[in-house]
Image (cartoon, rainbow, N blue to C red):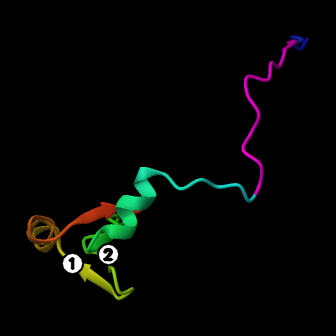
Amino acid sequence: MAAIIETTWAKTKAAEPVGAYTPTLVDADKATADFRIIDVTCRLKRIVWRDGTQQDVTAAELRKLETQHTWACDF
């Protein structure tokens, strides 16, 4: 015989209305970074430069770029 489970939902706060997004400090960091890291799942890591060009780099190249430029994670 299956057990019957009862739950109660309590609304704690209202969700932000659709289209009313307020930029955060994370958004500002991403906008001002020289490059953003967008993928680290493979041997080559993918970054996007501020001008929109994408580049695949090794972990060693990424570490070097991180010391020379401002950067942010975008995932």
In the image, residue 16 lies in the stretch drawn in magenta: yes
Q: Are marks 2 and 1 in contact (CB under 8 Å)?
A: yes
Q: State left or right for residue 70 relative to residue 20.
A: left
Kindly identify the residue that appears in the image at 27 percent across and 81 percent down. Answer: 56
Kindly identify the residue that appears in the image at 77 percent across and 49 percent down. Answer: 17
Sequence-earlier tag: 2 or 1: 2
Say which element carries label 1. Answer: strand
In the image, residue 70 lies in the stretch drawn in magenta: no
The x and y percentages for residue 55 are: 29, 84
Q: What is the quadrant of residue 12 in the picture?
A: top right
Decide whether the magenta segment is chiefly helix, strand or loop.
loop
Q: What is the quadrant of residue 37 in the picture?
A: bottom left
Numbered badge on residue 46: 2
Q: State left or right for residue 23 relative to residue 8.
A: left
Q: Look at label 2 and name its amino acid.
A: Arg
Q: How many marks?
A: 2
Q: Where does the N terminus fall, quadrant-wise? A: top right
- Residue nearest the viewer, comparing 16 with 5: 16
Circle 2 packing at 10 Å, graded few (<14), some (14-19), many (20+), is some
The x and y percentages for residue 29 are: 35, 60
The Cα–Cα distance between marks 2 and 1, rounded to whole angstroms, is: 6 Å
Numbered badge on residue 57: 1
Eyeballing the image, is 63 above or below 49?
A: above
Magenta-drawn segment: 5-18
Q: Answer whether residue 29 is visible to the viewer in this image.
A: yes
Eyeballing the image, is 68 above or below 8?
A: below
Q: Where does the C terminus fall, quadrant-wise? A: bottom left
Circle 1 packing at 10 Å, graded few (<14), some (14-19), many (20+), is some
Q: Look at label 1 and name its amino acid.
A: Val
The x and y percentages for residue 43 are: 25, 71
Say which element carries label 2. Answer: strand
